[in-house]
């Protein structure tokens, strides 16, 4: 079986409540996608989310709080459309490729 046939996409997402030093607040969905092949786990997608959360806190926001976490065996493109529909424009989105972060 070729490697492509046995690979699965995992999308890890954290919905964050963020606030700037000036008091402006919003909710942000950060999604990281990882291709899982063989026995590798989805931890790299979660590590990518944690690294992005640290960058958000360091460069853009004073407060970053996880409101909810979602992990699905799907690509992040599909999960993005599900969340966009469910939250009806209330979220900003940041999509990350954890496969690139692995190299």
Image (cartoon, grey):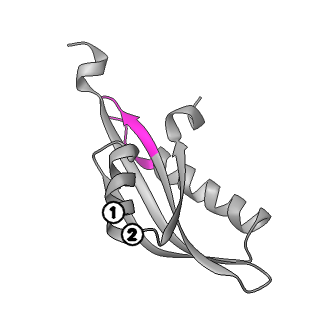
Q: Which mark is residue 85?
A: 1
Please, is residue 103 above or below residue 46 in the view? Answer: above
- State the quadrant of the C terminus: top right
Tell me which corner region of the image, top left, top right, bottom left or bottom right, holds residue 65: bottom right
Tell me which corner region of the image, top left, top right, bottom left or bottom right, holds residue 51: bottom right
Q: Secondary structure at mark 1?
A: helix
Residue 55: horizontal and vertical position, in percent? 71, 59
Of residue 2 and residue 21, the one placed in the foreground of this image is 21
Q: Which mark is residue 18?
A: none
Residue 13: horizontal and vertical position, in percent? 43, 58
What's the residue at 79%, 82% (across, down)?
21
Q: Secondary structure at mark 2?
A: loop
Residue 41 included in the magenta stretch of the image: yes
Q: Is residue 73 left or right of residue 69?
A: left
Of residue 15 and residue 53, the one placed in the foreground of this image is 15
Q: Is residue 79 left or right of residue 98?
A: left
- State the quadrant of the N terminus: top left
Mark 2 is surrounded, within 10 Å at the Cα level, by few (under 14), some (14 to 19) or many (20 or more) other residues, namely few
Contact between labelled residues 1 and 2, with CB atoms less than 8 Å apart:
yes
What's the residue at 48%, 48% (across, down)?
32
Q: Which residues are magenta?
A: 33-43
Residue 36 included in the magenta stretch of the image: yes
Mark 1 is surrounded, within 10 Å at the Cα level, by few (under 14), some (14 to 19) or many (20 or more) other residues, namely few
Of residue 20 and residue 63, the one placed in the foreground of this image is 20
Disc 2 target residue: 88
What's the residue at 47%, 53% (across, down)?
31
Tell me which corner region of the image, top left, top right, bottom left or bottom right, holds residue 40: top left
What's the residue at 40%, 67% (across, down)?
69
Residue 95: horizontal and vertical position, in percent? 52, 48
């Amino acid at each position: 079986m070729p490697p492509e046939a046995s690979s699965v996409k995992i999308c890890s997402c954290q919905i964050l409540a963020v606030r700037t030093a000036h008091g402006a607040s919003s909710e942000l969905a950060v999604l990281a996608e990882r291709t899982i092949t063989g026995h590798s786990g989805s931890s790299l997608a979660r590590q990518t989310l944690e690294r992005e959360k640290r960058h958000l806190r360091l460069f853009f926001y004073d407060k970053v709080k996880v409101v909810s976490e979602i992990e699905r065996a799907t690509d992040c493109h599909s999960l993005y459309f599900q969340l966009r529909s469910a939250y009806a424009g209330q979220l900003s989105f940041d999509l990350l490729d954890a496969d690139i972060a692995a190299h």
